[in-house]
Amino acid sequence: MTVILQKSFERTLDQLAARAVPGDSFEAWTFDDRESRAAAERALSERGITARIRSAYKPLLSFFLEEVDLKGVEAIEIRYPVHPAASDNRFRLETYPLGALVGEAKIAFVPRADGGFFYEVVLTGADIEQSVTVLAPNRVHQDRTGQTNLSPTGWLRRAGETIGERLETDYEVVFETAISAIADYDWGQDEPYFEELNIRIGHPSSDEPLAIGDEVVSLREALHEDLYFSLLEFFQMKSGRPLGDRGLRPGMIVPEVVQVEGAITLSITTRALSTGFLDGAAQAIDTASEPLAAGQVAVQLEAIGGEGFDARTRSGRTVFARYVAGSDAAVMISGGQHPNETTGIVGALRAAAKLAERKGAHFTISPLENPDGYAVHQRLRRDNPRHMHHAARYTALGDDLEYRTYENAAGHVNEKEIRFKAQDLSGAQLHVNLHGYPSHEWTRPLSGYVPRGFAAWTLPKGFFLIVRHHPDWESQSEALLDRVTRHLGEVPGLLAYNDRQIALYEIHAGETGFRIINGFPCLISVDHRHTVPMTLITEYPDETIYGEEFIAGHTAQMELVLSAYMAWQDIVSVS
């Protein structure tokens, strides 16, 4: 292990307390949880200091959660800023999921063109008419890649001041310190630059669950996400690749942001890759309420029968797969490309077990294509089980395995070989690739708030289906989606689930920008990336869900596979 940096940071709340004297009065906006801010206010009050400390992260949502009494409020109008350094709906997105938390009150969003960093809120009712201005402190800045961002920041406004001034908070300092230490380190010129780059931060903030779905206000999760993707962008720039290039192979980047008491701590180290799993007990697969143990995945897969085949990861772990040969039109089934998207792993196994009982069944099944990422996901869930953990998304090389080819692999085909073997064995022309996406809001608060390159996935919007096809396969794509969505519409509760999420998405994001086919959001596009002529990709909002929600998720994935398989038999026979 190589230590790059170890450091502790004084909390902004402690700094404010140390500077204040009896008789002072001020307002501050910091990146701290509700309980910490309230405790600081009480401690200051006992010293004769009047302070109101608000959240710099999602300030309007916090205003409604902490300061507004909605009794008697029938309508809410929110006039939000539009700034040239951000998307038009940036500040509207930042209020999510307010639309689901205001009871029967009607909520309306109205854009303001002045770009000022504040919301104007108008509350009306039979006996109520109130207007409030809510500050949303932001700054325009450039990051290490030269991109211009409009990001939330801390703020301080003393008594008598109209505007106030930026307050650089501990949250911002620890982020910038981590990025700078890694950017200034000598990584050499050749990818991969390391085996694991570990960024461990102890942060004294609690997550605040909200009263809708799996939504939560989590400063620690947001910091994990911003660190991970900011470092990917830095290494993309270092390698000469464009931002967002998923073929980058820096090694495994793992931020671990854990809850502590007291000062904020930062430790940056490089480590060797692990080779094991942190497996738990086996579960009844049809009612599995959390991600399966890797060992159980292997056992369930072997029970499907057929011919086994495999590939190896960078760490030496095995990617297991099976080929069931038969007279049907072949279908490739896969899961776990992004192993923090866990319902597809279970859904693929459940579907394959049912298909194996069919006379003439013809398919390949590779339910856990990225076991190195899955091991990281297991590790991160120990501290933060309800975080989305995108550090577990890519392989131990640091790339998205889908973008790896024999031509660009530079001797590291590894996990991707499982797909090449599956296609060679089966001759399949359809690949059903099971994925997921965040079940609650995904943000990068210190790099423009909305995740760069992933804006479409920042809010959940139901069970989303994507078809990518070669030219001249459009009619088959349309037929497949029509059949599959009709079948999924019969799964109890699934359409209602979609409707709720899409309605809330539209309140906060505006127009959806995607097609709705039989109640399911869909996207169809021509794409030459895949060697298989047609790829059906599922996107279930599953990152962080457990219990009945997890069961519903892998049941939907299973039903999708079974429906697509049966529809494909008819589509191929007609073609």
Image (cartoon, rainbow, N blue to C red):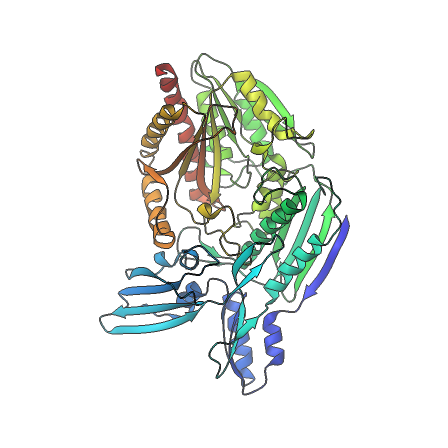
Q: How many marks?
A: 0
For residue 476, side relative to residue 238 (left or right) = left
Decide if residue 263 is in sight here.
yes
Q: Residue at x 69, y 47 (%)?
A: 197
Query: Residue at the left extreme?
Result: 126
Query: Residue at the bottom extreme?
Result: 23
For residue 396, side relative to residue 189 (left or right) = left
Residue 485, image x, y percentages: 34, 32
Q: Quadrant of the rendered structure where residue 249 is?
A: top right
Q: Quadrant of the rendered structure where residue 121 is?
A: bottom left
Q: Is residue 98 above or below residue 402?
A: below
Report the front residue among 533 and 7: 533
Query: Residue at the right extreme?
Result: 2
For residue 367, side relative to residue 112 (left or right) = right
Residue 11, image x, y percentages: 62, 69
Residue 73, image x, y percentages: 28, 67
The quadrant of the rendering that contains the C terminus is top left
Residue 186, image x, y percentages: 76, 49
Report the front residue among 538 and 65: 538
Report the front residue among 315 and 252: 252
Decide if residue 72 is in sight here.
no
